[in-house]
Amino acid sequence: MPWIEIGLKINHIYDDNGFNWRDGEVLKNFKLYGLDKYSKINIWYIDWEIKRQKALKLGLKDVPINNIVDPRSLSTRLAHILLMKHQMYPFWRIDFIRLALSKGPKIIKRIFA
């Protein structure tokens, strides 16, 4: 794997308050694709504006010029809060029905087996 060969520690747990290569990659992607593309991904517990400011102080290029503001809707924010607190998928999300149909029978079978 090329990332291992160049010394990136992909399994390393980094401090949320610091700045690491992963933060830089996320910021680059924000600049390339915009924030809305990432609005449904549960990454917004991190203050990306602070990360952007740290990247600028470090002299990194290819980071967003404008301030980073959480692009999530209220529904998505609540879903992420529930997910982080209980590791449950919220029922009001449209994909819940697909998830229930795909995993529900397996769970029921396991319970009654």
Image (cartoon, grey):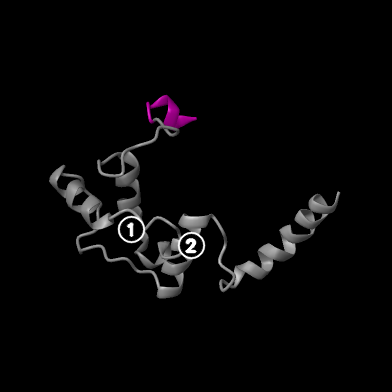
- Residue 30's disc is 1
Which one is earlier in the sequence, the residue at label 2 or at label 1?
A: 1
- Asked if residue 25 lies in the magenta stretch, the reply is no
* Quadrant assignment, res 43: bottom left
Q: Nearest the camera: 99 or 10?
A: 99
* Quadrant assignment, res 10: top left
Image-based side of 55 in relation to 33, left or right: left
* Quadrant assignment, res 3: top left
Q: Residue furthest left?
A: 57
Q: Amino acid at mark 2?
A: Leu
Q: Amino acid at mark 1?
A: Phe
Q: Judge whether 14 appears above or below 6 on screen.
A: below
Image-based side of 87 in relation to 69, left or right: right
Find numbered disc 1 in the image and state the secondary structure of the residue it sits on. Answer: helix
Image-based side of 12 in relation to 95, left or right: left
How far apart are labels 2 and 1 at the CA level?
Answer: 25 Å
Q: Judge whether 41 appears above or below 95 on screen.
A: above
Determine the residue positioned at 45% across, 59% down.
Answer: 41
